[in-house]
Amino acid sequence: MLYIFYPKENVHINKSQLEKDMPYIEYKDEGGYVSTEINNLLKKRKYNWLYLKVVDFLDKLAEDDDLSAYFNLELLKAIGDGLIEMRIPKTDKKGVFRIYYCNSELKRECGASVLLEAEYKHGDPMKIGAARKRKSEYLEKIKKERKNEKN
């Protein structure tokens, strides 16, 4: 699984894809909405455990092309309108980190997952609406790009 940290457009280079002397950019340093939330986990010492779980989970997904096992375990869940939710961990009394994403629409993005929004939550999800809005923005941007390519 490849990642794009929306609103950035470049595909994140996974550790296994690095060529000699290429620097690795960590998820927290990618920029975009999801990267900001991941970075926020590091700002409070009590969330370092969750930061490590998030990075580990993203690394595992990055190396896996068949995500069916993650859906079966409900670590990934389709939530409608083409949005998918990552749950890290699936459940925990201390809270769950959620990443909302959709699949890319452009060939140059190599089928990457567009990470739209994230939140650390204890109760009801609060940022699903924001994720849907960001997906609409992403699709609108693609529509404009395709229109410009035809002209």
Image (cartoon, helix red, strand yellow):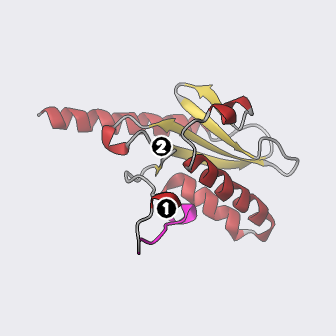
Q: Residue 92 at what x, y percent from top left?
A: 85, 46
Closer-to-camera residue (27/111):
111
Circle 2: residue type: Val
In this rendered view, identify the residue nearer to me: 16 or 90: 16
Using the image, determine if residue 77 lies above or below residue 33: above
Horizontal and vertical percent position of residue 90: 77, 41
Residue 19 sits above or below residue 95 on the image? below
Secondary structure beneath label 1:
loop
Q: Residues within 10 Å of mark 1 (few under 14, many from 20)?
A: many
Q: Is 22 colored magenta in this rendering? A: yes
In the image, residue 2 lies at what x, y percent? 48, 47
Res. 48 image quadrant: bottom right
**Which residue: 49% across, 56% down?**
32
**The magenta stretch spans which residues?**
21-29
**What residue is shown at x 82% (from left), y 42% (from top)?**
91
Q: Is 122 on the left-hand or right-hand side of 93?
A: left
Secondary element at image label 2 = strand
Is residue 128 left or right of 105 when viewed as pictured? right
How busy is the neighbourhood of tag 2: few (under 14 within 10 Å), some, or many (20 plus)? many
Query: Based on the displayed image, in which of its 4 quarters is residue 54 positioned?
Result: bottom right
Q: Which residue is mark 2?
A: 114
- The alpha-carbon separation of the residues under discs 1 and 2 comes to 13 Å
Identify the residue at the far left of this view: 151
Looking at the rendered structure, the kind of residue marked 1 is Glu
Place of residue 39 in the rendered image (x, y in percent of width and height, measured from the top left): 62, 64
Label placed on residue 30: 1
Magenta stretch: helix, strand or loop mostly: loop
Q: Which mark is residue 42?
A: none
In the image, 33 versus 90, the foreground residue is: 90
Q: Quadrant of the C terminus?
A: top left
- Evaluate if marks 1 and 2 touch, with contact meaning CB atoms under 8 Å apart: no
